Image: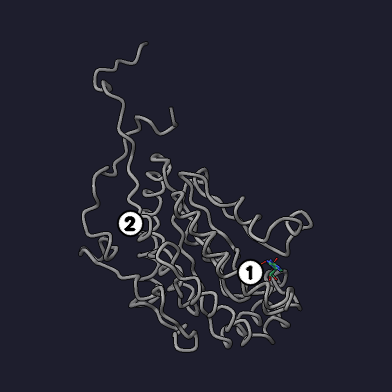
């Protein structure tokens, strides 16, 4: 018997009280508000240009206070949905986060996934491959960290590094990384067919914003540990990275594993948009509590 069985939650087990497939919603200022996240999803078969997407977009949020209120509410809903996902134990969610340096992956994870039951959530970061990882096929280290049933897993960097840093720094020949888009699509399809929902989020900041954030790291003693002189080398390759991100997004946004481009110059807006995308996905997955054992109403707990 799983730990959840028989638990009585305040959340109704039936369908949610609105059309989860079109929008998400919540009570705001005493009114039911519907919020669209589709605007940020890259539709399969279309081609985006990052230069045409405004990183300052705040998705209709009026400011930090507005965002804080909304984030709190969405987080409660994410947490409730995660409880169901865990109880149901049939599906899983993989959230892939990618960004340029200082793009805000760490902050996003900290703010959006705060409050989730740690038993049902894992975060994996991917750095330069270890010897063991490099000795296996290119997707091995990602596959072994993919979520188990009932889990939410966040990838802080991901399989996409194999067509980002590897491409920009020419760590393998073009004919090798060129094949990887298709391999990644196939890999994600395998996960999707096995019950894993995947969303991929690119945190989109401007080059000016990156400069500000790098400067802030230098100026604040408790942020200096985050500064690496190597980041300047990556900044010098800004255009190459943007092109590599565009190709990854355009070639790998699929129905089963869509990419979202998240405007991320304003951290407070970024967190809310990411939270909306996560919640919308969980609601589409519609996890249900398993049926209770028959006869529970007659159960008397012995002294
Ligand atoms: P983060 O920037 O995510 O907080 P680090 O500062 O430790 O973490 O950076 C991890 C580094 O690992 C990045 O420079 C990234 O480009 C590099 N990296 C990740 N995956 C690969 C890979 N497959 N091949 C080469 N380098 C990689």
Residue located 38% across and 31% down the image: 5
Q: Which mark is residue 161?
A: 1
Q: For residue 210, which quarter of the picture?
A: bottom right
In the displayed image of the protein, which residue is found farthest to the right? 131
Against 151, is 186 above or below? below
Q: Left or right: where does residue 125 sit relative to residue 297?
A: right
Label 2 – label 1 distance at C-alpha: 28 Å
Front residue of this view, candidates 147 and 109: 147
Some atom of ligand 1 lies within 8 Å of the CB belonging to the residue at label 1? yes
User: Residue 49: horizontal and vertical position, in percent?
Assistant: 48, 86
Residue located 38% across and 76% down the image: 63
Residue located 49% across and 88% down the image: 51
Front residue of this view, candidates 160 and 276: 160
Mark 2 element type: helix
Q: For residue 125, which quarter of the picture?
A: bottom right
How many numbered dots are placed on residues in this image? Answer: 2
Quadrant location of the N terminus? top left
Quadrant location of the C terminus? top left
Mark 1 element type: helix
């Amino acid at each position: 018997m799983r730990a959840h069985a028989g638990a009585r939650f305040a959340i109704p087990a039936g369908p949610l009280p609105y059309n989860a497939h079109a929008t998400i919603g919540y009570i705001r200022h005493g009114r039911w508000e519907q919020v669209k996240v589709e605007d940020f999803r890259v539709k399969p078969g279309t081609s985006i240009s990052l230069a045409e997407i405004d990183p300052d977009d705040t998705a209709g949020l009026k400011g930090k206070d507005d965002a804080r209120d909304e984030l709190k509410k969405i987080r409660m809903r994410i947490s409730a949905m995660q409880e169901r996902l865990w109880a149901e134990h049939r599906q899983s969610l993989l959230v892939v986060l990618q960004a340029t340096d200082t793009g805000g992956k760490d902050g996003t994870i900290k703010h959006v996934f705060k409050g989730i039951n740690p038993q049902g959530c894992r975060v994996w970061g991917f750095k330069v491959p270890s010897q063991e990882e490099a000795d296996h096929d290119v997707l091995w280290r990602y596959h072994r960290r993919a979520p188990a049933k009932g889990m939410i897993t966040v990838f802080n960097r991901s399989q996409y590094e194999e067509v980002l840093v590897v491409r920009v720094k020419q760590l393998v020949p073009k004919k090798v990384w060129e094949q990887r888009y298709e391999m990644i699509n196939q890999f994600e399809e395998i996960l999707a067919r096995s019950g894993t929902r995947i969303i991929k989020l690119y945190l989109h900041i401007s080059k000016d914003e990156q400069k500000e954030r790098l400067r802030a790291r230098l100026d604040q003693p408790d942020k200096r540990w985050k500064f690496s002189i190597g980041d300047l080398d990556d900044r010098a390759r800004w255009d190459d990275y943007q092109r590599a991100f565009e190709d990854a997004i355009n070639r790998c946004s699929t129905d089963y594993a869509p990419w979202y481009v998240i405007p991320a110059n304003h951290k407070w807006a970024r967190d809310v948009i990411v939270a909306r995308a996560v919640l919308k996905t969980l609601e589409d997955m519609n996890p249900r509590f398993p049926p209770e054992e028959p006869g529970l109403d007659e159960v008397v707990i012995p002294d």
